[in-house]
Image: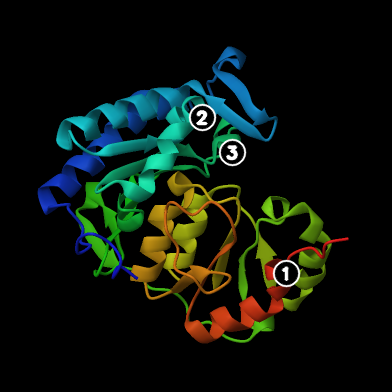
Amino acid sequence: MTDSLPMPISAPISQAQRTSILNLLRRAAKTEILPRFRSLDPSEVSEKTGRQDLVTAADKGAEAMIARGLQRMYPHALIVGEEAVAEHPEIRDKIGDAELAFTIDPVDGTWNYAHGLSTFGIILSATRFGVPVFGMIYDPIMDDVMVAEIGGEAMMLLPKRRLTRHVSVSAGGKLDELQGFIPFYLMPEDKRAQVGAALPLFERSHTLRCSAHEFRLFAQGSVDFLFSARLTPWDHAAGALISRCAGGHVAMLDGSEYNAATREGVLLCASNKETWERIRDAFSFLLETPAEG
């Protein structure tokens, strides 16, 4: 995976720095996110690409605070925040070449957050040349975090209770025994009829409109698989790493490795390789390109 990269890939995050990053996310939640939850003024909510794609004052305030803190800790790192990229798309183009980059989704699940649902979180990753090496998914409501670094195990940290526990994916199984997340409306529009026809193959499929909690549930074995479409590094880099460190099989649907610089295709996380292959085969039509007329 990393043979072609200019240097060995490792996580440049010490234990003290991990604690500092978590404290930064907690402060951003306490200062910018939680005070506005269920108290947003209409003027603090606006559309980006449409009415399903929202941004709030909490997104902007939290990202600015997190970005400032990261830049102080890592002066030479590239900071790739969702809201910054919305205004300056060229930032995202640099992630594949950056020796160290941080991605930030300050309020993942903004639609839920803006409508008073507590299913939202903060996602942060560190990447090296696009390879995720550190991931953190924080739940501001419960004040707990799922975290992993390349080569290690995925863990759930409960700071207030000073508890740490390892998490691991489910055992997988046959298609009709599986439940997972399929983002139907994020799939290619010309493939949605086929996606819909495949849904009855599974015991259950759904979506939370929140990558943070979908990845957390997958990594702790509550569901067996997870699709991600319309790839963005702030949504998917941390979750892909955490899923792999929790024992899951993580790859693009064509079998290639996920990289935070990847923009096209569908990412599939499953409990193990055998389960991944069964799901891949059921959705192989997503790999087909339209015939030229």
**Screen quadrant of the N terminus:** bottom left
Task: Identify the amino acid type marked 3.
Answer: Asn
Coloration mode: rainbow
Q: Which of label 2 and label 3 is nearer to you?
A: 2
Task: Indicate which disc, 2 or 3, sits on the residue closer to the N terminus.
Answer: 2
Looking at the image, residue 79 sits to the left or right of residue 206; the answer is left
Seen in the picture, residue 72 relative to 181 is either above or below; the reply is: above
From mark 2 to mark 3, how far is it between C-alphas?
20 Å
Q: Which residue is mark 1?
A: 288
Task: Identify the amino acid type marked 2.
Answer: Ala
Q: Which residue is mark 3?
A: 112
Q: Give the image location of residue 197, x and y in percent.
A: 82, 69
Q: Nearer the viewer, residue 258 or 137?
A: 258
**Screen quadrant of the C terminus:** bottom right
Q: Which residue is mark 2?
A: 86
Mark 3 secondary-structure assignment: helix
Looking at the image, residue 34 sits to the left or right of residue 199; the answer is left
Mark 2 secondary-structure assignment: helix
The numbered mark at residue 260 is none
Residue at 69% in and 75% down? 284
Task: Identify the amino acid type marked 1.
Answer: Glu
